[in-house]
Image (spheres, rainbow, N blue to C red):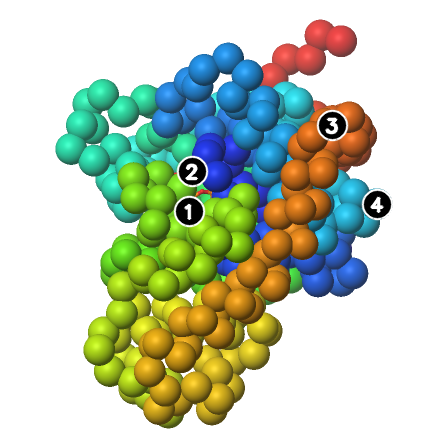
């Protein structure tokens, strides 16, 4: 059966890219599939440890953003990763499944470690194995994320495939696999882990920096003007859009005219994603107009869409009782799914069980 898993790291402010590329796209899935949304705090420490209390408050803030964006704790499991031990345990096992060569190819590690690779944490290098464990501890079939996570999801499939192959006989013998829905010569008939499908579609799979249309909008960009944070007020939003980099030309009337104009493409994409229409539809309305006309419209739209969410986030974080209760019950429900999976995995590998 279909099951969705996705997450966001509690590192600094959530921005429009996280919202449009990930969280907002999770909302409709809640009525179509079983959905599990995690605040991935174990991932957050790969980049370093933060001051006392910061990790906890960032975790609550991301949870508040999920709820304010429309993730309903009655429909979805919402929890923070560190509370379910199985993530770390399965990640260790996947450290022994994944190959060094696979991880050496990961572009996110190269970008995040920068020039100082020797001093990056081992955790940052092994990050994709933990991400595979997050997904496969629930045997999730679908993962909605932004385009930047595509390579990590391919690695997740490689890990699942290698595990299924290496232990094919054991999985059949124990009778705990499911028939491979798309039989192929490379895979056994019975799979324990599904080959997860990435869900990366729509006009906002990669929102770019407002200061540089060739760089993705990111929490770690030192310039606050490069991103719209979900906690920004109306003044901040309109100031950032006003200052957003553009070229001097009017907007084109066809999407083909956005080629080679990354900043224009990005702003039109943001407008499209915020209204839920295509870029072509946006150009039908604004094609031929100058940025001096388009930017105020975009800013009004962003304020209209984001400010109710910002208010709700503030209400939720002012008194964290509700958030903490959601995370507690979410972690219990998540454990109920992940514990039996790890029990199977231990059996498949053949650890001696003395209990
Ligand atoms: N610019 C973006 N456009 C579309 N989607 C994006 N995502 C991130 N940036 C964009 C998606 O947001 C989800 C959560 O991301 P994450 O918390 O794992 O962190 P990240 O990808 O590392 O996000 P940042 O903001 O870019 O942080 P830093 O600066 O630390 O690298 C994912 O689904 C991601 O695709």
Asked whether residue 68 is in view, the answer is: yes
Q: Cα distance, mark 4 to mark 2?
A: 30 Å
Sequence-first disc among 1 and 2: 2
| Total tally of numbered discs in the picture | 4
Image position of 65 (left or right of 204) = right
Q: Nearer the viewer, mark 3 or mark 4?
A: 3
Q: Which residue is mark 3?
A: 319
**Element assignment for label 4:** loop
Q: Residue at x 44, y 24 (%)?
A: 45
Q: Which residue is mark 2?
A: 128
Q: In which image quadrant can residue 231 be found?
A: top right
Labels 1 and 2 touching (C-beta < 8 A): yes
Decide which of 91, 118 is in the foreground and name it.
Answer: 118
Labels 4 and 2 touching (C-beta < 8 A): no
Decide which of 263, 114 is in the foreground and name it.
Answer: 263
Expressed as whole percent of the image width and height from the top left, the position of residue 56 reads 58, 22
Q: Quadrant of the C terminus?
A: top right
Sequence-first disc among 1 and 3: 1
Expressed as whole percent of the image width and height from the top left, the position of residue 123 reads 39, 25
Q: Which mark is residue 74?
A: 4
Q: Which residue is mark 1?
A: 152
């Amino acid at each position: 059966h279909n099951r969705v898993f996705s997450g966001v790291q509690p590192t600094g402010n959530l921005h429009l890219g996280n919202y449009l590329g990930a969280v907002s796209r999770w909302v409709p899935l809640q009525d179509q599939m079983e959905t599990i949304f995690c605040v991935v705090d174990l991932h957050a420490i790969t980049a370093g440890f933060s001051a006392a209390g910061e990790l906890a408050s960032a975790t609550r803030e991301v949870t508040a953003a999920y709820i304010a964006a429309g993730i309903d704790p009655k429909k979805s499991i919402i929890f923070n990763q560190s509370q379910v031990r199985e993530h770390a345990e399965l990640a260790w096992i996947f450290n022994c499944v994944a190959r060094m060569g696979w991880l050496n190819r990961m572009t996110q590690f190269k970008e995040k470690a920068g020039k100082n690779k020797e001093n990056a944490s081992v955790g940052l290098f092994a990050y994709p194995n933990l991400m595979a464990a997050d997904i496969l501890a629930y045997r999730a079939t679908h993962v909605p994320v932004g385009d930047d996570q595509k390579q990590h999801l391919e690695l997740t499939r490689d890990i699942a495939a290698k595990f299924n192959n290496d232990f094919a006989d054991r999985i059949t013998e124990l009778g705990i696999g499911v028939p491979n829905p798309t039989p192929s010569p490379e895979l056994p008939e019975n799979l324990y882990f599904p080959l997860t499908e990435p869900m990366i579609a729509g006009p906002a799979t990669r929102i770019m920096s407002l200061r540089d249309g060739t760089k993705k909008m990111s929490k770690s960009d030192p310039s606050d003007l490069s991103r719209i944070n979900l906690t920004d007020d109306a003044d901040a939003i309109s100031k950032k859009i006003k200052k957003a980099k553009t070229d001097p030309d009017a907007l084109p009337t066809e999407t083909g005219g956005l080629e080679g104009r990354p900043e224009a493409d990005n702003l039109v994409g943001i407008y499209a994603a915020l209204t839920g229409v295509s870029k072509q539809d946006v150009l039908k309305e604004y094609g031929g107009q100058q940025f001096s006309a388009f930017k105020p419209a975009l800013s009004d739209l962003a304020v209209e869409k984001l400010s109710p969410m910002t208010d709700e986030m503030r209400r939720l974080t002012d008194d964290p009782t509700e958030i903490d209760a959601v995370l507690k019950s979410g972690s219990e429900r998540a454990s109920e799914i992940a514990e039996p999976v790890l029990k199977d995995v231990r059996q498949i590998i053949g650890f001696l069980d003395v209990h």
